Amino acid sequence: MLIVQQILNGIMLGGIYVGVAVAFTLTIGILNFLNFTIPVLFMLSGMIGWSLSFYGLPFGLSEPLGWLPSLGIGIICAILASLVVERFTYRYFKAKHGDATEHAIPLVSSLGFLLIFEYMVLIAHGSDPRGFHTPFGDLDLRFAGLVISIPQILSLVVSLAIVAGLSMLLRRTQLGRALRATAENPDAAVLMGIEVNRIVPVVFVLTGLLCGLAGALFAVNYGEVSPYMGDQVGTKAIAGMVIGGLGSVWGAIAGGLIVGLTETLSIHFFGATSAQITVWGLLLVLLLFRPKGLFGHNAIGKGKF
Amino acid sequence: MPEPILRLEAVGKHFGGVVVLEDVSFDVRAGSRHALIGPNGAGKTTLFNVISGVFPPDEGRVLLDGLDLAGVPSRRRIGMGMARSFQNIRLMPHLSVVENVMLGQHARPGLLRKLKPVGLLPKSRERDEALEVLDRFGLDAYRGQVVANLPYGIRKKIEVVRALMAEPRLLLLDEPAAGLNSTETAALRDFLMEVSARGVTLLVVEHDMPFVNSLCEHVTVMNFGRRIYDGPAAGAREDEAVLDAYLGTHHKKGASDAA
Amino acid sequence: MSGYMAGVLAILGINVIFAYGIYLTAAAGQLNLGGAGFQAIGAYAAAILSVELGFGIVSTIVLATLAGALIGFLIAFPILRTRGVYMVLATFAFAEVVVGIILNSDTLGGAMGMIMFDYIETPAVLWTAAGVVAFVFYLMSTPIGLAMRAVHDDEPVADLMGVNNRAIQVAAFASGGALAGLSGALYAFYFGFVEVQYFNAFLSIFVLLYVLIGGTQTAWGPLIGAAFFTLIPEALRIGEDWRFLIFGVLIVLMMIVRPEGIVTRDAIDRIVARLMPGDRRA
C-alpha cells in the first residue's frame, strides 16, 4: 500500500511540473526559444501572492488580502512580467543573421531576466521560506488506507483542466491555428496573413498564465513559498518537457507526471538525494538516444545556436 | 587521349521516389574548361554534391584520376585535388577575407603546420601566400574586412580564390557568374582563363550562355537528371535534344543561338 | 596587495580559466551549459588526489586537469549527437548528474564537502591564468583555431574545405573540460574546501554568460567578460543580492546594445587601425 501512496504522491507532484513544462514546451515549439524566465515567473506568482496575503497591497494601501485574491494578483503579476520579458527579449530574436551567438540572444537575455526577478524578490523579502495559509491546509481524503490532500487533488485537476483547455485552444480556435502555423513555419505564416508580431505576445501571456497558476497551486499545495521555489521546479519541468518531446503539449503533461513519479519513487527506494541522479540521468539518456522524446517532432530545437 | 581527371560512370541519385540523376556518364579532360549546363532542376547541383561527396551516388561511380571515390569522405577530397564553390556564396561570415582564403590552405598536409601561430606572427608563408593571391586578383583592398559586409561580386571572387588556395587540379564552380553584372562577368571570365592557364581543370555549372561560350570549349548538357549532350561547345547549339530541352519540342528554326 | 584585493584577483583568475574552458566549445559552435559539472570534476578530483591519495599540489592539479579532459573527451561523443537546444539541455543535464553523483557519494563527502590540507596563494592562480590566456590566444591564432571558427560558422563548408569537424568538436570539448577541471582544482586549493552546493546550475549559467557577453568571435571575449563581471560588482561595493540584480540588468542591456558580445572582430579591427594606421593586416 505504501508504494501505491508513493505513486499517488508522485502524480500529485508531477501535476505541479505539468503547468511549467507546458509553458516551456509552448515557447520552444512556437518560438524556438528556451525561455529561462519561466522558473521565476512561477516563483513570482507564489511570492507576490504570499506578500499580499501577509502585508496587503504595497504602501499600506490595504489590509492583508485573502488567499484567493492574493494568488489571483500574483498570477496577473506573472503575466505582466512575462510581457516585460517579451518586450526586451524576444524582440531581438527577429534580427537573426544565421549566427551561432546571435541565436543565443533571447536565451542569454532571458537568463538576465531570471537574475533580475529572482534577486528583486530576494532583496525585498530575503531568502527564507514563508508559510502560506489556506483554509484547507490539512484537509485530507482518506480512502482504503491512502491519504490524499484536497489541495493536491485540486492542483492536479486544475493543471489538467488548463492543459486540456489549452490543447482545445490550439486545435479548435482561429488563434490556435495561427499559433500552430507560426510554429510550423514563421515565414509561411507571415505570407498567410498571420500577424506574427501579434501572436508572439500571446505566447508570453500564456506562459505567464501557466507559470503563475502553477506557482499559485504550489503555494496552496505545500503551504510554503520561497524565492528559490522556481529553481527546482523549473529545472524538473525542463526535464519533463524533454522527456515528453519538445513542442508537444501532451508530451509535457506525460513528461511532467513521469518526472514527478521518478522523483518520488527514487526518493522512496534510494533516499532523499537520489532523485538528482535518476531524473537528470533519465533526461540525459533520453536526450542522447531518443532526443525527440515521447511525442516530439524531430525538427524542433535543432537549429544552430 | 590522356586519362580524364574526372570520370562519371552511370551515376544515379534519387531522393525518396524522385529520381534526380539517372545514368549520367561523362569525362572531364585534364586541363579543359568544361561547362555543365541545363534547365533549372536538371540535377546539376546534385551532381556537384555527389562529386564533392556531400552525399554518395545511389548507382554508378565517380572516379578522380582513375580512382573510385566511393567511401572517400567529403573532407578528404579537397586534399586529393578537388575544390569547389557554392551556388549561394558560403564564405565564413565571421572570418576576415584573408582568414577565409587561408582556410583554403587547411587541406594541405602537415600537422606541425597546423600548430603554427599564423594569426600572431607579423609575417608567415601562409599569410604571404594568401595576400599574394588576393593581390593578384585585385582583392587586396578587402583583405582585412569581415566578409559579411562585402559586395556580392567580390564575395563570389573570394570564394573562388579560397578554393584555389587548396591548389586543386580540378575546380568545381557552381554558377560563378550568377548575380554579376556584365563588367563583373567579363572580369570573372578573364580571371578563370588565368586560372585555367595555370593548368587547373574547370568544371562550371552556369546559366549565362554567352559566359559559357566564351569560357568553355566543352559542354555537357543535362535535362531531367539525364545527360542529353556531351561534346564541343559549338556542337550544343546545333543539337536537337538540347534545343528541345531549352525551347520545348516545337522550337522554331533559327532560334538555335538561344542555346 | 591587500588580502581583499588578493581574494578578488584569485577569483578573477579562476573565473577566467573556467570561462576559457567554456569558450573553447563555444568558439567551435557548441554551447556548453554544464560548466559547473566540469569544474566540479576538477575540484573533486583534486580533493581525492590530494587528501585521500596524498599527491603533491602540482601533480594533483595536472591530474585533475587531465581528469577534466578525459571526461570532456568521453562525454563529447554522446553530446555531439545532439544539436541546438538539445545540446544546451544535454550539457545542463550532464552537470546535474555529476552533482547528483557527488551528493550521493560518501567517499566524496556528499553534501558535507571535503576539506583540503594544502593551499595555494593568489600569485599561483594568476600565473596559471596567464598561462591559460596565452595558450588560448596561441591556439586561436593557429590554423586549428581558424578551423574551429570555420566549424562555428558553417559545418558543411568547413568539411568540404578539409576540416575534420568531429575531431575539432571533440577536441574542443576535451580541452574545454581540461580548463574547467583546472579551474576547479585551483578553486579547491585556493579556498581549502570543496562543497557540492557551489557547483549549481547558476554557476553553469554565469560562466556561459561571461563567455557570451564577452563575445565568442575572438580570444579576448572570455577575458573581458570574466573581468567585467568579476570586477564591476566588486567595484560597486554593494550587497550580494544587488550585485546579481545589476548583473541581470547589464546582461539584458548588453543583449540590446551589443548582442555579439563586448569584443567583436570589427571592434578589434577598428582599435588596431587606430593604433597602427599603417598596418592593414587582418
Image (cartoon, coloured by chain):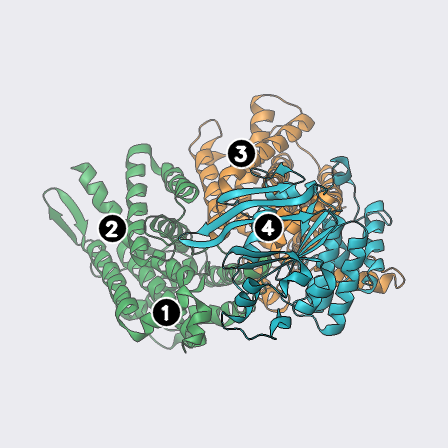
Chain colours: A green, B cyan, C orange
From the image, tell me which residue sits under label 1: A179
Numbered disc 4: secondary structure = helix
Residue, disc 3: C74
Number of residue marks: 4
Q: In whole angstroms, how far apart are the C-alphas of marks 3 and 1?
A: 40 Å
Whether residue C47 can be seen here: yes
Residue kind at label 1, given as amino acid type: Leu
Residue A90 percent across, percent down from the top left: 50, 68
| Disc with the residue nearer the chain's start (4 vs 3) | 3
- Going by the picture, which residue comes out furthest to the right? C278
Residue at mark 4: C155
Q: Is residue A258 left or right of residue A102?
A: left
**Contact check, label 4 and label 3, Cβ < 8 Å:** no
Q: Amino acid at mark 3?
A: Leu
Q: On what subunit does the disc labeled 3 rest?
A: C
Q: Identity of the amino acid at label 2?
A: Met
Disc 2, SS:
helix
Real-space CA distance between mark 4 and mark 3, rounded to the nearest whole angstrom: 22 Å
Q: Residue at x 29, y 54 (%)?
A: A253
Mark in the foreground, 2 or 3? 3
